[in-house]
Amino acid sequence: MSVHGKPEPHRHKVPDHVSPELVHTLDLYEGEGMRTAPFHAIARLHEGLRVFWTDYSPRYGHGSWVVTRAKDLMHVLNNPALFSSAGWSQNQAITGATWPLVPIELDGRYHVQFRALVMPWFVGPAIARLDDTIRTRVNTLIDRFGDQQNCDFVDAFGRPFPVSIFLDLMGLPQDDMPEFLGWVYQLLHNMDPPARIAAATSIIRYLEDTAEDRRHHPRDDLITRIVNAELEGRPLTGDEIIGLLYTLFLAGLDTVAASLSFHFHHLAVNQELQLKLRAHPELIPAAVEEFLRAFSPVTARRRATADTEIGGVKIKAGDWVTVPYSLGSLDPDEFENPLQIDIERKNIRHFAFAAGPHFCLGSQLARRELAIALEEWTKRLPPFRLREGEKIRVHGGSVFGIDYLPLTWK
């Protein structure tokens, strides 16, 4: 395809202000290595341009700039007035919805206010009170498959563990977990537009119905608190409520599960480190931080609000900027041997939870879930490894993940 020629499917016309030498087609979904080792694959971008334009987009209908260095990711994420979050997800917009995801698609005063509204439910004492629940849930799941001496980690533990904790917080039924996971997978990891729209519509309708139920039948759960919350002395609007619930639903059902599977896969193929953590469980929190750095699965976007420049490249107002958190966490200018796992690494300033004003609200909960999972697995089960003769299944996309991880501890 000619750089400025007729677009092919999922490849879009390059704007006239983008120089041809800055165009590099990046496919985070089906590109080389994305179905086998996505973090190694994307890290190769550090060998090329600091900032480039990708003309490929199976989800958004337009190309974007891609920043590849940690300092540039930090610049973009710390400057919401210049790089806006408004409209970046489109996970609701595909249905025709015009409300934003709250608070991740808000900037400025309203973003700060909504973060302050939600923050008490995800920090400090609120998370500490969940420790026993998290530990009990880990052991309940292990009881189901521990004697079998093998499992598909993703289906048996990686997804149901963090998702079940989230469903308890929200007050959603555990029995509906398979349906919820099916919707989220179709929305986030399927490139077929009708399937994505159907999944998004199902999630929105379910959350709207549940919010309406909580108005008339309140419970001790997060949905009830959100429905009855106030901002600046007024009740939240219907759009604000659904925008916040939809954001929490998508975040709670995908990202921690994705991280868990990468962490356990690494330990399955690195027995020396696994045995070290078994012998020294006090090292598990440090290991979790290093895993979060090495396996930062999320890619976000921002939109320039004015003409600007990054690394000598001119960015026009209205241009989209793709921000793969993994490129910041694996930047060789920031981390020596970035693809190597070193739980004694001193610099642990990673991008697994983003950076700047939109730093992940659920980071404390995620850290506790990841650490407790490792603690209980290494206490309850013998050393585990990949099942011989089987291959894992991996997906790329806006959130990298593992779909099949066969483990054994025979």
Image (tube, rainbow, N blue to C red):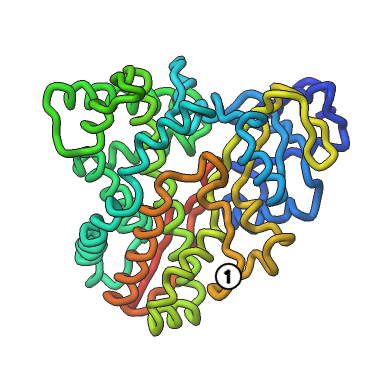
Residue type at tag 1: Ile
Q: Is residue 191 left or right of residue 140?
A: right
Q: Is residue 309 left or right of residue 205?
A: right
Residue receiving disc 1? 341
Q: Residue furthest left?
A: 217
Residue shown at the point (83%, 36%) measured from the top left: 313
Residue 188 seen anywhere in this rendered image of the structure: yes
Q: Is residue 69 above or below residue 405?
A: above
Secondary element under disc 1, as helix, strand or loop, is: loop
Screen quadrant of the N terminus: top right
Give the image location of residue 292, x and y in percent: 51, 59
Residue shown at the point (58%, 56%) measured from the top left: 350
Task: Please tell me how crowded label 1 is: few (under 14), some (14-19), or many (20+) other residues with Cα within 10 Å.
Answer: some
Give the image location of residue 221, x and y in percent: 20, 38
Give the image location of residue 235, x and y in percent: 29, 20
Could you say which quadrant of the image residue 52 lies in?
top right
